[in-house]
Amino acid sequence: MKRIALAVLFTMLTAAVHAAEPATASIVVVVNPHSGVDKLTKDEIIDIFLGRYRKLPSGKMALPIDVAEARPERARFYQLLVKKSPSEMSSYWARLVFSGQTSPPFQVPDANTALELVQSSPNAIAYVDRSAVTAGVKVVFELEP
Amino acid sequence: MRPSLRQGTCAAVISTLAILFSAIPRAQAQDMGADRFTFRGFGSVGATTHDTDGIEYRRNTGQGSGARSGEVDFATDSLLGLQVDARLSSKLDVVVQGVTRQRADDSWRPRFSQAYLRFSPGDSLVLRAGRIGYDIYLLAESRQVGYSYLPVRPSPEFYGQITNDDIDGLDVAWTRRIGRGLVKARVFGGDGSGELAFADRSTSDTIGQVYGGTFDYIFRGWTARVALVQFNYDAGADIPLLAGALRATGFPSAAAVAEDLDHRSYRSDGVQVGVAYDDGPMLAQVMYGAVDSDSIAGPDFDKLYALCGYRLGKWTPFASFASSNDRSEIHDAGLPPIPQLAPLNGAVVQIQQATRSTQHTGSLGLRYDLNPHIDFKFQVDRTHVRDSSLLFDYRPDAGTPFDMTVITAAVDFVF
C-alpha cells in the first residue's frame, strides 16, 4: 500500500506543469465620474474585490462588479491583482461565503454590462480591458501585465 | 442521545427567519438587480484507509465510527452542505445552511449548521444573530468546505475536539483601515453544543455557553490572528452520582477528585495565535493553540499546526505537521486496587480519557484543480499516537503508543 501511494504521489508531482496563461493586455479599474475618487491604490482594490473592506476613499460604500467566470478578463484581473487562478479565487470565496463572512462581488455577464452599471451607480467599481474604456467612466488604477 | 435544548432554539431561529422571508416585501430587495435568493452547495467524497489493525481513524470526536485498516471508508471524509442566501435589502440578508455528515450516532441526519440574520449598517460593521459559526482558526472559517483548503481534512490534532463550531447567539465584526493594512475585530457569544462518540459506541451531548473574540491584522497576503474563547459547559447528570460515590469511600484522594469534578458546569479557556501567508502560488500558515480547564474533566493541552503549499499550475503539492499534547497525565481516584473500588477508579480515568489528544501527524499531499468548482486531493498522513480520544483503539494492547499511516483520496466540489 505504501509503495503504491508513493508511486501515485511521485507521478503526480512529476506531471506538475506551469499552466498560468500569460496576460497580454492591461486591465484598468474604473469608477463612476461622480464617485469622488480620482485614484485607488492596489491595496485598496485588493481589499474591495476580496471583500475585506468595501469602502472608497471618498467615504462611500464600494460595490465591486465581477464579469462572468468564463470571461478571460476576469481571470487576468485576479492573476494581475493577487496572482490567483480562477480555481484559487473560487476556493477563496468558498471559504468566506459558506462561513457568512462576506459576499463575492456582484456578477454581470460581460464588460459592457459592467460599464453600464458603473456609469449609472456612483458606488460601483469594475475592471475592463483598457481598450474597452468608455467616456462615461473614470480610470483609477491600471494593472499592467 | 438525549434531545438538546438547542434543537428547540434552532427551530425558533428557523421559524423567525421564515417569517422574515415572507414578511419583507419583494420591492425592498435592492442591489443593482441582484437575485434575491442564491442557492449554493459544497461537498466532499473521501476514500480513507490506513494500515493499523484494531484502530478506527476519525477526523473528529463527533464521529460514531472510523476508517478501519485494509478497508476503504467513505464516511470519514465525506459530507454534503446546502446553503440559501436571501437578500432582504441592501443591508439585511438571511443565510440558512444545512450539512449532512457522519454524526456521533453514526447517522447522517442533516443539521442546521448556520441560520442567521445579517445586518450590515455600514461598510465596516456587520452584526449577525441566529446560528452562527465562531471560527477562531485562521483560513478555516468554514472547515466543512473541503474545496476551500488544501488538505483532505482539517487537522484532527488541531480541530478534532470541536465537533460543532457554531452557537445560537450573535456576533459583531468591525473592520477599519490602519495604515496600509486592515484591522478586524469580532466578538461573539451564545449557546453551543457538541456531540461526542465513544469507543463503546455510546454518545453524549455537551451543552454550554461560548464567548470569545478574534483580532486580525491583514496586509496583502499576510494575516495574523489572535483569538480568545471561553467554553462553559454542563458537567452532566452522572457527575453528582460519581462524586457522591467517591466521597463515600472516605479516602482523601477520592474526596479531592470529587471536589474537582462536582460542579454544575466546567470552564475551559482557549487562546490561539496564528500567522498565514497566502499570496500568489504560495500558501503557508503556522498556528499555536492552548486550552486550560478548571477540572480534570476538561481538556488541558497545547496544539501546533504548520502547513505549506505551492501551486504549480493546476497542481498544488503541500506538506503539514500537527501536534497536540496533553499537559497532565491521567490519574485515577487513588483508591486501593480492590475489585469493589475498581469501577470508581475506572470512571475517573474514563472521564479524563474523553478529552485526550496526545498525538502528532506529518502529512504530504497533492491537490489538483479540475476546474473552479471541483478539486481532487491525495494525501498520506503518518501519525504517532500516544494517548488520544480522536481514534477508537480496539487493539489487544489498547492504550499503548503506536504509529499509523493513513491514505486518503478525495473529491471536493462547490456549486
Image (cartoon, coloured by chain):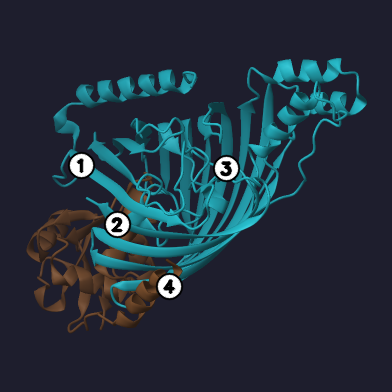
Q: Is residue B259 above or below residue A44?
A: above
Asked which secondary structure carries label 1, the reply is: strand
Disc 3 residue type?
A: Tyr
Q: CA distance from mark 4 to mark 1?
A: 46 Å
Q: Position of residue B171 (x, y in %)?
A: 47, 37
Mark number displayed over residue A3: 4
Disc 1 residue type?
A: Thr
- Disc nearer the start of the sequence (1/2): 1
Disc 2 residue type?
A: Val
Q: Nearer the viewer, residue B318 or A61?
A: B318
- Disc nearer the start of the sequence (2/3): 3
- Tell me the shade of chain A: brown
Q: Position of residue B181 (x, y in %)?
A: 48, 64
- Disc nearer the start of the sequence (3/1): 1
- Of all chains, the one bearing label 2 is B
Q: CA distance from mark 4 to mark 2?
A: 22 Å
Q: Which chain is cyan?
A: B
Q: Which residue is mark 2?
A: B411
B272 left or right of B27?
right
Have a look at marks 4 and 3 and say if they share a chain.
no
Q: CA distance from mark 3 to mark 1?
A: 46 Å
